[in-house]
Amino acid sequence: MKLSREYLLLFLGLLLAMLLSVMPLPDTLSMARPAWVLLVLTAWVYRNNEVDVLVPAFIVGLALDALFNAVLGAHGLALVVSLAVTLRLRVLLRTLILWQAMLVMLPILVINTLLLHWLDGLSGHSTELSARWWPVLSSFLLWPLVVLLHRRTRNESSASQV
């Protein structure tokens, strides 16, 4: 029962992240749009032990490929690689305070961006690498907020079970 509730919360979080990823924004804000799906998934890995996120991440990555007209599997691969690194660093992340964990997350966000840039370059849909750093910066700055919101949501769901 608890595990199905966790997957439901993950599904709702990913649905919200995908909606935020495709929400229309002005051009000045659109170029700095955070990687919402990656933020939600890494926050989930940071806080949860019992829920596997790699398969849902790949499926959501395929949906992002369809939404953004990217090479099929590009977002899925980037998400899975980034989350695999996050899973390997989970114990370290949990021993650090939030601002230190945020600094550890920066290379993971960079890995995701570089993988997407490389795969886009292979497919001929290349964009300037400099344009890809604004989403890394905005994701880096928003990651603690997403973690705190996730912590609050989990605490509220745990309290409602009692």
Image: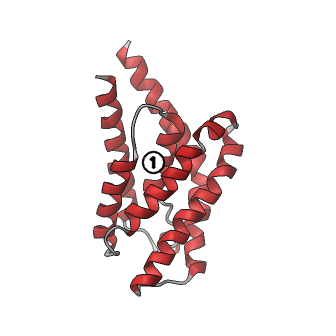
Residue at left 39%, top 69%?
74
Tell me where residue 64 appears, x and y as whole percent.
34, 64
Dividing the picture into quadrants, the one containing residue 76 is: bottom left
Residue at left 70%, top 37%?
97
- Front residue of 149/37: it is 37
Instruction: Please say if 74 is above or below 98.
Output: below
Tell me where residue 30 appears, x and y as whole percent.
47, 71
Tell me where residue 122 appears, x and y as whole percent.
44, 83
Instruction: Please say if 67 is above or below 35.
Output: below
The amino acid sitting under disc 1 is: Leu
Q: Is residue 36 visible?
A: no
Residue at left 39%, top 25%?
157
Give the residue number, with chain letter if any, for mark 1. 41
Q: Is residue 127 visible?
A: yes
- Front residue of 71/142: it is 71
Residue at left 45%, top 48%?
41
- Front residue of 26/75: it is 75
Dividing the picture into quadrants, the one containing residue 148 is: top right
**Left or right relative to 104: residue 121:** left
Furthest toward the top, the residue is: 162
Instruction: Please say if 60 is above or below 6.
Output: below
Quarter in which the C terminus is drawn? top left
The colour style of the image is: secondary structure
Tell me where residue 34 appears, x and y as whole percent.
51, 61
Dividing the picture into quadrants, the one containing residue 95 is: top right
Label 1, secondary structure: give it. helix
Quarter in which the N terminus is drawn? top left
Instruction: Please say if 16 is above or below 153.
Output: below
